[in-house]
Amino acid sequence: MAEIISLQNISKQYDADTRALDGVSISMNEGEWTSIMGPSGSGKTTLLNIIGCLDSPTEGMVKVAGTEVTGLSQKELTLFRCRNIGLIFQQYHLIPYLSALENVLVAQYFAGAQDEEDARKTLEDVGMGRRLDHLPAHLSGGEQQRVCIARALVNAPRLLLADEPTGNLDSGNGQKVLALMEKLHDEGHTIVMVTHSPEVAALGDRVIRLVDGRVMSDNRNEEQKSNVAGELTEEESA
């Protein structure tokens, strides 16, 4: 598999007393699902933000989809992110006065093009075809998260980044979102997901654990992934 992410000796220093990342070197392959775990303050979200071009390292080199993003201007970073990276957050960040369809169209607008038919199809693909005209306030938490996933997918990004995507959902809606993430992975999407849950992490191909801004372990996950996937399928069928 081709490499899609390369981090070399990444450090992030916010102030004299706060070093979020300390010499992290990681590579990830296209089509891989990587779960990132660690205690609060370990640098998980900072790492995800640097991969997603939402933040820049103090030291080190970041290459995403063949582009060394550490050398890009802020304007170039924004355009690169819109065209190559889909972002899914614990907080949905939907625009409250726009419909589900309009929220997805906004993502297309910032990438430089709009195609309403494509936006509709993307929402249909995540099970929201009958809720296109609903405002976020009229959608359940699980439905709002599926709109967020559609928004992340609509520009056909090479990379999906998710920060605790089920953190605000009840168990039933959380399982539905995870089943959708599994489907996307099976279709070939590259996923990097921050999670506190060992069960969610086990869905990935590998689990990277951070402690105090450093990589403590990086393990392949095939047997555990298989077991958890089977449990999710049984719950979906129940």
Image (cartoon, rainbow, N blue to C red):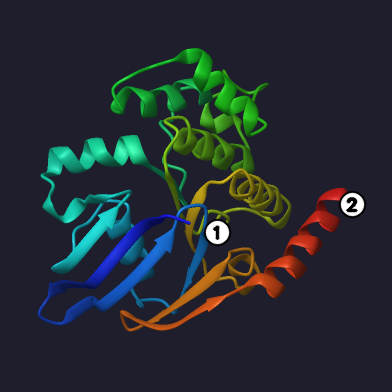
The image shows residue 74, relative to residue 170, as above or below, that is above
Residue 18 located left or right of residue 111: left
- Residue under pointer 1: 167
Q: Are marks 2 and 1 in contact (CB under 8 Å)?
A: no
Residue visible at 59% across and 70% down in the picture: 197
- How far apart, in angstroms, are the residues tagged by discs 2 and 1? 23 Å
Q: Secondary structure at mark 2?
A: loop
* Residue 47 on image: x %, y %: 32, 65
Tell me which corner region of the image, top left, top right, bottom left or bottom right, holds residue 111.
Answer: top left
Residue visible at 68% across and 21% down in the picture: 130
Residue visible at 62% across and 37% down in the picture: 143
- Binning the other alpha carbons within 10 Å of mark 2 as few (below 14), some (14 to 19) or many (20 upward) gives few
- Binning the other alpha carbons within 10 Å of mark 1 as few (below 14), some (14 to 19) or many (20 upward) gives some
> Is label 2 or label 1 in front?
2
Tell me which corner region of the image, top left, top right, bottom left or bottom right, holds residue 180.
Answer: top right
Amino acid at the residue labelled 2: Ala
Residue 125 located left or right of residue 111: right
Q: Residue furthest right?
A: 238
Residue 11 located left or right of residue 43: left
- Residue under pointer 2: 238
- Count the marks: 2
* Residue 206 on image: x %, y %: 54, 70
* Residue 138 on image: x %, y %: 59, 29
Residue 143 located left or right of residue 101: right
- Give whichever of 118, 143 is nearer the camera: 118
Residue visible at 12% across and 52% down in the picture: 71
Q: Secondary structure at mark 1?
A: loop
- Tag on residue 191? none
Amino acid at the residue labelled 1: Gly
